[in-house]
């Protein structure tokens, strides 16, 4: 993924709210969200090039997502493992979030720059091989793009502002509220040059990558995803996929029925 937000214990009905966008080249093959994995317990999209995923959850309540860290190519030459395997590595295991974060820090050199969030239900952890840090996420609203956790880029700050306002307005019907979250994820406004981050790519790419939602011919936002966990610990997974120039493709709305919960 390239942009995500986590709201932990910030809504009276949903202890965990996740939303985010996956930006990628359109010619990179991927499967839409479905059940897969050895035991069919993992639900999420799948990268058909490397075999991992950018976001997934399981019937036992495990959740994980990863973003890349935007950096000059020279800093990534020694990496050999796909970052998508960070997500599947947690989802397909029984290791705790705390232990997994420690395991990842021992394998930092194997991956290009990454940020990962993972855990069981709303007890989530963060790890990064560029920030060289890990730990449990406190209650609150956390945003993550292609830099370290809660870095105040224009689009992360805008998404946080939009979702914070929606969290305060919790009286409207849930489906209308969810569409408002999707609308926030479709914000395609670019930001002025003077407030753009300097991440090692040229200015033209910084401009193209600055909006929350990226429209392009060869590269852009391919999916917007929302994950909710209610007070009964039941998950709801919603996803809208897109083609070039932001053309809508498929919509997924799936209840994840729990089996063998870990908490």
Image (cartoon, rainbow, N blue to C red):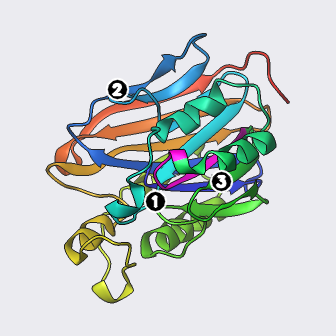
What residue is pinned by disc 2?
A: 48
Q: Residues within 10 Å of mark 2 (few under 14, many from 20)?
A: few
Is 62 part of what is drawn in magenta?
no
- Left or right of 11? Residue 75 is left
What residue is pinned by disc 1?
A: 69
Q: Secondary structure at mark 2?
A: loop
**Res 42 seen here:** yes
Q: Residue furthest left?
A: 217
Q: Earlier in the sequence, mark 3 or mark 2?
A: 2
**Front residue of 188 and 167:** 188
Q: Secondary structure at mark 3?
A: strand
- Left or right of 54? Residue 234 is right
> Residue 163, located in which quarter of the rendered image?
bottom right
Q: Residues within 10 Å of mark 3 (few under 14, many from 20)?
A: many
Percent across and percent down for residue 45 are 44, 30
Q: Can you say which quadrant of the picture contains the C terminus?
A: top right
- Mark 3–mark 1 Cα distance, whole angstroms, equals 12 Å
Indicate whether 238 appears above or below 42: below
Residues under numbered marks 3 and 2 in contact, where contact means CB atoms less than 8 Å apart: no
Q: Which residues are magenta?
A: 110-119
What residue is pinned by disc 3?
A: 127
Q: Residue at x 35, y 66 (%)?
A: 72
- Left or right of 144? Residue 127 is right
**Res 171 seen here:** no
Q: Residue at x 68, y 53 (%)?
A: 126
Indicate whether 147 appears above or below 249: below
Percent across and percent down for residue 113 are 48, 56
């Amino acid at each position: 993924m390239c942009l995500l937000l986590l709201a932990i214990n910030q809504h009276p009905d949903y202890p965990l709210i996740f939303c985010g966008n996956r930006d990628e080249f359109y010619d990179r093959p991927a499967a839409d969200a479905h059940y897969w994995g050895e035991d069919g317990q993992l639900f999420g999209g799948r990268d058909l090039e490397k075999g991992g995923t950018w976001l997934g959850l399981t019937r036992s309540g495990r959740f994980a997502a990863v973003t890349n860290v935007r950096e000059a190519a020279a800093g990534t030459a020694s990496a050999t493992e796909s970052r998508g395997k960070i997500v599947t590595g947690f989802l397909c295991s029984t290791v705790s979030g705390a232990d997994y974060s420690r395991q990842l820090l021992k394998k930092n050199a194997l991956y290009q720059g990454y940020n990962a969030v993972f855990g069981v239900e709303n007890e989530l952890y963060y790890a990064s091989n560029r920030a060289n840090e890990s730990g449990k996420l406190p209650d609150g609203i956390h945003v993550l793009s292609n830099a370290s956790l809660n870095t105040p880029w224009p689009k992360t700050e805008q998404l946080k502002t939009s979702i914070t306002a929606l969290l305060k307005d919790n009286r409207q019907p849930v489906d209308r509220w969810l569409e408002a979250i999707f609308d926030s994820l479709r914000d395609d406004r670019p930001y002025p040059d003077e407030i753009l981050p300097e991440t090692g790519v040229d200015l033209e790419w910084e401009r193209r990558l600055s909006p929350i939602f990226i429209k392009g011919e060869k590269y852009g936002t391919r999916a917007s995803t929302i994950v909710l966990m209610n007070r009964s610990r039941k998950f709801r997974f919603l996803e809208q996929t897109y083609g070039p120039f932001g053309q809508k493709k498929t919509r997924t709305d799936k209840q994840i029925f729990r089996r063998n919960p870990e908490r």
